[in-house]
Amino acid sequence: MKKTKDLYQNVAVELLTTHSWYMHQLKTVLKPYDISPAQYNILRILKGAKDTPVSASFLKDQVIDKGSNITRLIDKMEIKKWVTRCLCLTNRRQMDIDITEEGIKILSDATKEINELIKVLYSITEEEAEIVSKILIKIRS
């Protein structure tokens, strides 16, 4: 029993260590673009919405880091002219958020760098990548 417990504790430590390492790499890659991983994630969501503005609550549901302060992030991104915010025509209590051309450009440029970073994962086979992905999904379920 002790060996099993130690094994699962080791898995937990390895997950945390890998997350910390990858986030450090990601922040380093994004730093020249003055964009955080959370802001990058929001831009990806907005671009994926295909020219349809979305609400802050939609973004909150979709972001990877559920602890992100969406309003604060949108405020900063609006100052940088990466997003626009306007009153929703169908719900006056809601703001519609959309990506700008400048936001699309910064997303495109940063994505090129992130695609290079993702190449570190090529050290495992496609079969191993599928297994890891399935295991991580199972852990979160």
Image: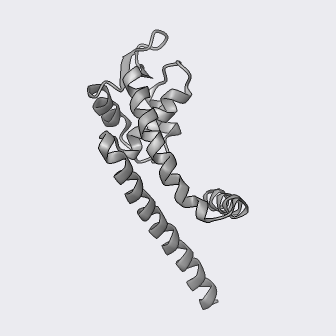
Q: Seen in the image, is 141 located left or right of residue 91?
A: right
Residue projecting furthest to the bottom:
2
The colour scheme applied to this rendered structure is one colour
Percent of width and height locating residue 75: 29, 30
The residue nearer to you, when weighing 100 against 55, is: 100
The residue nearer to you, when weighing 44 against 28, is: 28
* Residue at (47, 40) in percent of width and height: 111
Quadrant where the N terminus is found in the figure: bottom right
Q: For residue 84, what is the image quadrant?
A: top left
Percent of width and height locating residue 107: 43, 34
* Residue 30 vertical placement versus 72 (above, below): below
Q: For residue 97, what is the image quadrant?
A: top left
* Residue 87 vertical placement versus 121 (above, below): above
* Residue at (47, 31) in percent of width and height: 57
Residue projecting furthest to the right:
127
Percent of width and height locating residue 116: 49, 50
* Residue at (30, 44) in percent of width and height: 32
The residue nearer to you, when weighing 27 against 90, is: 27
Note whether residue 40 is visible: yes
* Residue 136 vertical placement versus 69 (above, below): below
Percent of width and height locating residue 67: 41, 48
Residue projecting furthest to the left:
79
